[in-house]
Amino acid sequence: MSDPGSSGVAPSLWRPLRTKIFRNLLLADVISDVGTFMQSVGAAWLMVSLKAGPLYVALTQTASSLPFFLLALPAGSIGDIVDRRKLILFTEIWMASIAIVLAVTTVGGFITPALLLILTFALSAGDAFESPTWRAILPELVPKEDLSSASALNGIEFNFARAVGPALAGLVVATVGAGFAFGINAVSFLGVIYVVARWKRTPRVSTSPRETLTGATVAAIRFVRYSPRLRGLLARSGSTMFFASALLALLPSLAHTVNPSPLFYGVLLGSFGVGAVLGALAIQRVRSRWSTDRVVSVGVLAMGLSMLAAGIVPNIPALTVSMMIAGAAWIVFISTFNVVILNHTPDWVRARVLAVTLLVSQGAMAGGSALWGALADKFGIHPILMWAGVGAIAIDAVGLLLFKLPDAAEDLTPWIYGKLPAIVSGEEPGAIDSSRVLVTVEYEVAAEHQEPFLHAMQEYERVRRRDGAYRWGIFRDLENATRFLETFLVDSWAEHVRQHQRSTGADREIAARVQKFVLGAPRVRHHVQPLFPERPANG
């Protein structure tokens, strides 16, 4: 995805709509998201109607967020292994089925606070399994130059639904009850199911061995662990979401204290959505003029001030304006982070990294919602909102100092380094796929270049470990002062084959910095752990 700020010219916002599959999915998804927001409003208001306190109401938000924390990582791994189209189709059918159960039990009068939380969790579990894959297919739907605009259009679609869904839900809940809102949500899944079922997706062709669920999950954790920039992004995103969660978690209870009608709660969420749409429309122009850090910092500052205002001046006009500002700030923050993460994640691990992002952000939302709800039960809604607003502003300042956000996109062009050896031991490659591999690389380095060479190798270590090595070392030859030996271990030959295909253009630059200090071409050897023959039985 190109960075709008790099050229100073914002790309056309509407150009991705020329792509039929993207256009159809966007239209189907806006209907589905309207239904989803109707379900969220209906569930929160139904919990209030069941005489549950602020803790139970806040736990509704926790039930919606917790599945992302529990399921996102395995969901992302599956999304990088199986057919992404089939996975989306399965999860859409699952969510439609749960929505039907929720509607029937509510209309039939069987719903309880505990059952509402369970069904909300089950519905969100489907969304958690789908979300990493849904985000990862975006580069498959539109050309690379349209990714930034397509991401913004997704934000506009989502927040248009956020503006319309709550207001419509407030009307439906007030007139015919929450059960009918749940029924509309069940029907809203049909459009996405139809479009995805008809999508003729081009299958991905990979020459590397297929990953297992466990191996893919380990690879995701390893990739994030050895990607310092991604770790900084996740730390800043998660800490901000933790404080920002107070606003949405406490909003149903806050709205009820000001006006007991569900229409008012729907209007507040609609105002949040309207603000988000306006923010999404403006973000392309803003990102072309401001640095990424400045965009995010202003967004979080506005979010914190909105929470402060909601806690200090809890009346209808002030809350409506605060929610509009908060909505604009929210979409600026979320959209900018999504673009930065996509700009630094290669295709082979994209769904998994997005899953880790969801795990962190939704885990922060789930934990934050539960904490703010418990504190509001004890100290009151208004002071807790104010403290959460102060916390958001403070964490924004800390993030600005410690975790700078990059403006330029990383070169994610696939780069296959080196060549795999011709296997001459008489064994077939498939027979050694599970054997551990030791790779050694011999370098000749002149004395005056050895210090900068070792500094460059420290960065190269991160790349080796990120892409598959579980142990790495660099050694000096005691018999030859100019000779160094790099060694690293990989779990299996299959994983080493994948390791050769995971490097990017950015890694090539690191390899070039190492090679600059090396005399001649490095000498690479591959060693596979042998299978020891069984001892003959004692005769």
Image (cartoon, helix red, strand yellow):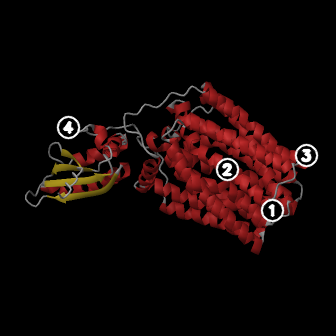
Cα–Cα span, label 3 and label 1 = 23 Å
* Crowdedness near tag 1: few (<14), some (14–19) or many (≥20) residues, C-alpha within 10 Å: many
Answer with the quarter of the image where residue 184 lies. top right
Q: Which mark is residue 176?
A: 3
Dot 1 or dot 4: first in sequence order is 1
Q: Which mark is residue 74?
A: none
Q: Nearer the viewer, mark 1 or mark 4?
A: 4
Residue 526 on image: x %, y %? 22, 46
Query: Quick check: can you spot residue 166?
Result: no
Which amino acid, by three-letter code, is at mark 4? Answer: Gly
* Mark earlier in primary sequence (3, 4): 3
Q: CA distance from mark 1 to mark 4?
A: 73 Å
**Is 73 on the left-hand or right-hand side of 485?**
right
Q: Nearer the viewer, mark 2 or mark 4?
A: 4
Q: Crowding near pointer 4: few (<14 within 10 Å), some, many (20+)?
A: few
| Marks 3/2: CA–CA distance | 24 Å
Which residue is identified by label 1?
254
Of the two numbered discs 3 and 4 in the rendering, the one whose residue sits closer to the viewer: 4
Residue 186 coordinates in the image, percent (x, y)? 76, 40
Q: Amino acid at mark 1?
A: Leu
Q: Which residue is mark 2?
A: 124
Observer-nearest residue: 30 or 512? 30
* Residue behind mark 4: 426
Give the Cα separation between the discs numbered 2 and 4.
52 Å
Which residue in the rendered view is the most extreme toward the bottom? 378
The quarter of the picture where the C terminus appears is bottom left
Under circle 2, the secondary element is helix
